[in-house]
Amino acid sequence: MGILGTLGSVSKGASDKAKNISEANNLKRKILYEEERIVEIFTDIGKKYYKNPDGDNSELRVLCEDIDQRRRRIKKMRYELNGIRGYKICPKCDAEVNERFQFCGRCGARLPDIEDEDFMSLEPNDYYTESSNNFFNADSNKNY
């Protein structure tokens, strides 16, 4: 391989790495937007309920469905982001596992795959986000 071939492969590698960084940053930005929007929707739910606690809850159900859709999008985007980084997160022990593996090396749990039919089902803690974890924990740990 000549010097031009070497330069070509080096520039292709750099180009691929730059593309991956760009895609990762784009996904992070989208995840942050969805998380912020979820917090806004929770606020809207609280305001609507406060104004009319005994009223029709159908509007609140629509907002709750919007939150669930956003949670599913976040789950999918996090999976894609981890794929760009080359790993999967174990759903049981939160270990980072190489994306080639189907089972966790720490606890043995089956690792999620975006092709699984139940991939988009929501776990009870899926709405806990890195940026808003304190927001959601604030009301669950206090004894009034």
Image: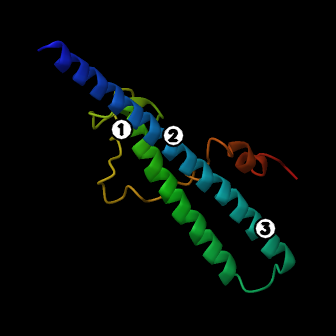
In space, the residues marked 1 and 2 are separated at their CA atoms by: 29 Å
**Residue 26 image position (x, y, % from top left):** 50, 45
Give whichever of discs 1 and 3 has the lower sequence position. 3
Residue occupying the point 30% across, 35% down: 103
Give whichever of discs 3 and 2 has the lower sequence position. 2
In space, the residues marked 3 and 2 are separated at their CA atoms by: 32 Å
- Residue type indicated by callout 2: Asn
Nearest to the eye among marks 1 and 3: give it: 3
Local crowd at mark 1 within 10 Å, few (<14), some, or many (≥20)?
some
**Residue 81 image position (x, y, % from top left):** 44, 41
Residue occupying the point 19% across, 13% down: 3
**Residue 90 image position (x, y, % from top left):** 42, 37
Q: Nearer the viewer, residue 23 or 83?
A: 23
- Residue type indicated by callout 3: Gly
Cβ atoms at labels 1 and 2 below 8 Å apart? no
- Residue type indicated by callout 1: Ala
Query: Residue 46: which numbered mark, if any?
Result: 3
Residue occupying the point 28% across, 28% down: 12
Evaluate whether residue 107 shows in this view. no
Q: Residue furthest bottom?
A: 56
| Label 2 element class | helix
| Label 1 element class | loop
**Residue carrying label 1:** 109
**Residue 91 image position (x, y, % from top left):** 44, 42
Q: Quadrant of the N terminus?
A: top left
As drawn, is 29 to the left or to the right of 109? Answer: right
Query: Residue 25: which numbered mark, if any?
Result: 2
Residue occupying the point 72% across, 61% down: 40
Evaluate whether residue 125 shows in this view. yes
Q: Nearer the viewer, residue 120 or 7?
A: 7
Local crowd at mark 2 within 10 Å, few (<14), some, or many (≥20)?
few
